Structure formats: structure tokens, C-alpha cells
């Protein structure tokens, strides 16, 4: 009679496990994650500021925009703290994101409330995918960071849902507007990770 094999403990999966030659080292990966997430949350705050500057408080979506901006500010504060704690250099493109985020927010708001919501949906869909990718890269050695990214991803999905419920898909030229914003968001992510 054979005895059952003893359970072999599996080691915790480390950040960057399964990386390929040419991929960033674990420390570089963490720096990229923190840098790009801080930049993204900064840009999100600026988008909502631009939208609110144009639409004001009286817009039917004004309260939703205020609440979403408030959540993005909380996200930004968390990543600002991580930048300091982990000694990560912020993106050098922050002045550009300052102007571009506000311009994107104001520009879509000038097209109307539905276009502003289309912007939210497009950006949040890209961010959700971006955060999901980060969660795959983060290992068990980064439990707190994974928890933060998961929480913020859930907030972004809720923002997307608010945008959809507010008629985002009824914005003029929605497919074109959405595709253009998503392309810009993906480029901003790529650049912010590296610069």
C-alpha cells in the first residue's frame, strides 16, 4: 500500500516571476507601476477638473463628476505617498499631463455631457485593462500594492459604469471619440512608464 505523497509547499510567486529576457527587473517593474499609476491618477484628476470647469455644478452629471474627481484625488494621494516611500522618480512628463488632461476634459465637455461621459468610459476601460495587467505582474511579495491596485481598479470600473448610465454611448461620433481617447490613453501609459 503506497502512502500519499506529501504536499510540497509552493513558493510564493514573486513580482516579475515568469519575465522574459529583456523585461524589466523586479525593482524596475515596481518603479514603472508606481510611476505610471501616479501619472494616470494625476491625469484623471486633471480630466475631471477640465470637465467641471466647462460644465459647472449645474450640469446633470455635475455631482457624479465631483465624486469621481474626489476618488481620483484619493488614488493620487496614495500613489504620491508610494512615490515617496519607494523612492520612485515621477514621470518627467507630468507638466504635459497637467495640460493635456485638463484639455481633454474641457474639450470633451465642450462637446456636451454625453461626450464628457464618453471620455470617462474610454479612459476607464483602458485603465481597467492596465490595472489587470499589473495585477498579473505583481507577486505575493507585494500584497499591499496588489490590494491598492485592485481597489482602485474597482473604482475605475464604477466610474465607467456611471459614464455608461449617463449616456456616454449616445455622444456624437461615439466610436470615433472613444477610439481616439483610448489610443491617447494607451500612449500616455507607455510613455509614463518609461519617461
Image (spheres, rainbow, N blue to C red):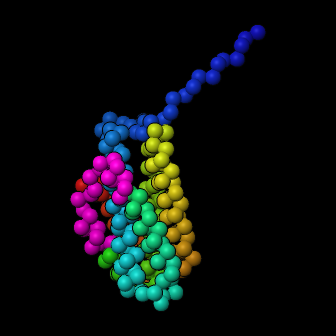
Foreground residue among 30 and 133: 30
Residue at 51% over, 69% down:
159
**Percent from the top left, x then y, of residue 10?**
55, 28
Foreground residue among 10 and 72: 72
When asked about the image quadrant of residue 56, the answer is: bottom left
Is residue 116 something that shows in the picture? yes
Q: How many marks?
A: 0
**Percent from the top left, x then y, of residue 164?**
54, 74
Look at the image and give the residue range highlighted in magenta: 80-101
Which quarter of the image is occupied by the N terminus?
A: top right
In the image, is 106 to the left or to the right of 154? left
Foreground residue among 167 and 36: 36
* Magenta span includes 153: no
Residue at 28% over, 56% down:
90
Predominant secondary structure in magenta? helix
Which quarter of the image is occupied by the C terminus?
A: bottom left
* Magenta span includes 90: yes
Is residue 34 something that shows in the picture? no
Foreground residue among 77 and 102: 77
**Percent from the top left, x then y, of residue 131?**
45, 55
Residue farthest toward the bottom in the current orientation of the protein: 58
In the image, is 10 to the left or to the right of 80? right
**Percent from the top left, x then y, of residue 23?**
33, 40
Residue at 43% over, 62% down:
75
| Position of 59 relative to 42 (above/below) | below
Residue farthest toward the top in the current orientation of the protein: 1
| Position of 188 relative to 86 (above/below) | below
| Position of 112 relative to 92 (above/below) | below
Residue at 37% over, 77% down:
49
Amino acid at each position: 500500500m503506497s502512502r500519499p505523497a506529501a504536499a510540497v509547499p509552493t513558493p510564493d510567486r514573486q513580482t516579475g516571476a515568469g519575465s522574459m529576457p529583456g523585461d524589466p527587473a523586479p525593482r524596475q517593474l515596481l518603479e514603472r507601476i508606481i510611476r505610471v499609476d501616479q501619472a494616470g491618477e494625476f491625469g484623471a484628476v486633471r480630466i475631471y477638473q477640465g470637465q467641471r470647469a466647462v460644465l459647472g455644478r449645474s450640469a446633470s452629471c455635475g455631482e457624479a463628476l465631483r465624486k469621481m474627481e474626489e476618488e481620483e484625488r484619493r488614488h493620487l494621494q496614495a500613489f504620491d505617498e508610494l512615490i515617496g516611500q519607494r523612492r520612485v522618480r515621477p514621470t518627467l512628463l507630468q507638466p504635459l499631463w497637467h495640460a493635456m488632461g485638463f484639455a481633454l476634459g474641457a474639450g470633451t465637455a465642450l462637446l456636451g455631457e454625453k461626450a464628457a461621459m464618453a471620455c470617462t468610459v474610454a479612459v476607464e476601460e483602458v485603465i481597467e485593462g492596465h490595472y489587470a495587467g499589473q495585477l498579473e505582474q505583481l507577486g505575493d511579495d507585494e500584497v499591499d500594492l496588489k490590494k491598492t491596485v485592485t481597489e482602485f481598479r474597482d473604482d475605475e470600473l464604477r466610474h465607467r459604469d456611471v459614464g455608461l448610465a449617463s449616456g456616454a454611448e449616445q455622444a456624437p461620433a461615439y466610436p470615433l471619440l472613444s477610439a481616439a481617447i483610448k489610443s491617447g490613453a494607451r500612449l500616455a501609459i507607455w510613455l509614463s512608464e518609461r519617461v
